[in-house]
Image (cartoon, coloured by chain):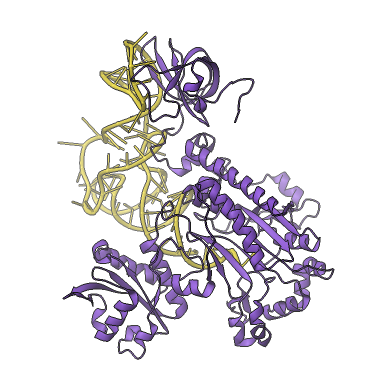
Chain colours: A purple, B yellow
Amino acid sequence: MDLSTSMRTDMCGQLGTADVGRTITVCGWVDRRREHGEHLAFIDLRDHTGVLQCVIDGSRDLRSEYVARMTGVVRPRPEGTVNEDLGTGAVEVDVETVEILSKSEPPPFPMDERTGVDEIIRLRHRYIDLRKSRMQRNLRTRALINSTIRKAMERQGFVEIETPMLIASTPEGARDFVVPSRKEPGSFYALPQSPQLFKQLCMVGGIDRYYQIARCLRDEDLRADRQFEFMQLDAEASFVSQEDVFEFISSAVADVAEVVTGDRPGVIPRITWNDSMERFGNDKPDMRFGMELVELTPIFEGTEARVFQAECIKGICLKGGVESLSRNQVDALVEDCKRWGAKGLAWMRVADDDGSAKLEAGVAKFLTEAEGTSVIQSLGAAPGDMVFLVADTRRMVQRVLGMLRLSLGRPAVDEGGFKFVWVVDFPLFEALGDDGNPIPAHHPFTMPHPDDMDHFNAGGEALHEVRSQSYDLVLNGWELGSGSVRIHRNDIQSRIFELLGIGKEEAQSKFGFLLDAFKYGAPPHAGFAFGIDRLTALLVGEENIREVIAFPKTQSGADPLTNAPGPLDATQLEELGLRVLPQAT
RNA sequence: GGUCCCGUAGAUCAGUUUGGAGUGAUCGCCACCCUGUCAAGGUGGAGGCCGCGGGUUCAAAUCCCGUCGGGACCGCCA
């Protein structure tokens, strides 16, 4: 692309032997200078395209990060001085004029890409950090992903609609960020956790296929994969089934993966929520590696061993674990499992017993020979392996072994390729809440599975059996996003509210505008949303979404660059009708 | 709300386990030298509230308590 301007003819990183003889002007930052006395200096000038060696005859006060404009003739480097490691390493510029556009203090951290720098220092001076190739690559890849998503959605007939940032607070879900109203003191707007309700209104409004690359805000604790504010591809379509949604989203995601990695993923496999819980111990399976949870409950039916008298027993096998795990590490794993809620972690080594595998150490002495043999066979264990068993409630076994599997086997973020998977058939209700009412696993507008309507109508215990038409997209163990077929029928919606213990009045006050809209001809509709920060981070091999966000916040929710959040002055508070309580000590 | 890890020069780290003389190294920075370097090289120099506060001790970067900041995770994130 031609990026020339009135100030420059070329970009530093784009010059090569084809340009030899041309008089060019480049602008950029001084990456490094190498001075050889009064009559020779090498200045590496950097812009976002790369670095160019500029040769100056005479001394100039050009220091690190000075902004300079240099004009000169491109020439081949003298024989034996070509730098193979540099894109522009075959040429250099014989500088005729140098203009210092801006001076710089020495940067607060090395611009050198080899040394890691404490993140708080990078964030405090993010404007400098952004000059480095890592952030340039990450942000430019992110931009490419956004534009690829837009093309994919528009190709499929989706219309970009912008929904408001200042909305009414809806009490469901995450904690809202709120904004005080000046014109109505004592009242507040909420910032959207997602455009969920608006996109459904768009369906009632005949938009047919809506999408938006939307900013969403949730006031919950931050993590490596969570910020207060994040971007989602948000989409919704009318007269569609779950299958149609899979088509739309898979197509967009495949385009993105292809444009970033060069490889187009095949058809994205599916796993039911139940299988995922049983085999991987969570609802966001990392499919890059095996070490699946193996059902061992039948082996221990009627066992004498007290530790294995439990509702559920599962195990995992760590290949070569005898070699790779020290006794201290094993003890630490046991402690981890207890912290995760298990009563304990049973482990055993698989030894070679005259050519056949045999369990020893750990809890092996509590097992009968038949039990031991069955465990080995079920887990496919071989001598040298380490096996881990957890006995507890089914839920706890899944949870603990699922986490143990990840801590033992999870590959680094940039290893193991990109394994997308659809998780389908989530339960409609997660569990019973403290008030005895079921808790929705998704949101209360999720359509029950058509095959489970009998259970749904029956109520009571049968409700646990009801699946929903909701689905998640998972990549390498990260939840990228989720979606569902929505309820568009008043009778089903009323029934849901009734089951959730939400009365007519409450429903009206919380979601009245949506329920009202549904009275006026709501098409069947379904949708999805996936997180762009997460997708980008994984595709560029970053284990932290802060690395793909220009100006992120720290884990405590602060911005070290602008010092947000900060107090308001008295006048502002007055105008908003707010008073701040003294901090409790 | 909880668990764990980290905090020493502008940067990256050692030193902390087992308290003991003056906290070192590398990079960067400043000055000078140097005409083919590219992580240039050479000589010299500056630069430290060992995060902060308290305690133990004859003596604390080191041990203890608290606190602040950063990170990973659990809870939370319909």
Q: Nearer the viewer, residue A489 or A353?
A: A353
Horizontal and vertical percent position of residue A148: 62, 47
Q: Nearer the viewer, residue B78 or A559?
A: B78
Residue situated furthest bottom in the rendering: A302
Q: Quadrant of the C terminus of chain A?
A: bottom right
Residue situated furthest right in the rendering: A520
Horizontal and vertical percent position of residue A367: 27, 84
Q: Nearer the viewer, residue B60 or A230?
A: A230
- Above or below, comparing residue A291 to residue A16 in the picture: below
Q: Quarter-wise, where is residue A440 in the image?
A: bottom right
Horizontal and vertical percent position of residue A366: 26, 83
Q: Is residue A439 left or right of residue A76?
A: right
Horizontal and vertical percent position of residue A549: 55, 45
- Identify the residue shown where x is 52% and y is 65%: A269
Q: Nearer the viewer, residue A506 or A385?
A: A385
- Identify the residue shown where x is 50% and y is 28%: A13
- Identify the residue shown where x is 64% and y is 85%: A455
Q: Is residue A463 left or right of residue A111?
A: right
Q: Can residue A408 be seen here? A: yes
- Above or below, comparing residue A487 to residue A127 in the picture: below
Q: Can residue A309 be seen here? A: no
Q: Quarter-wise, where is residue A301 in the image?
A: bottom left
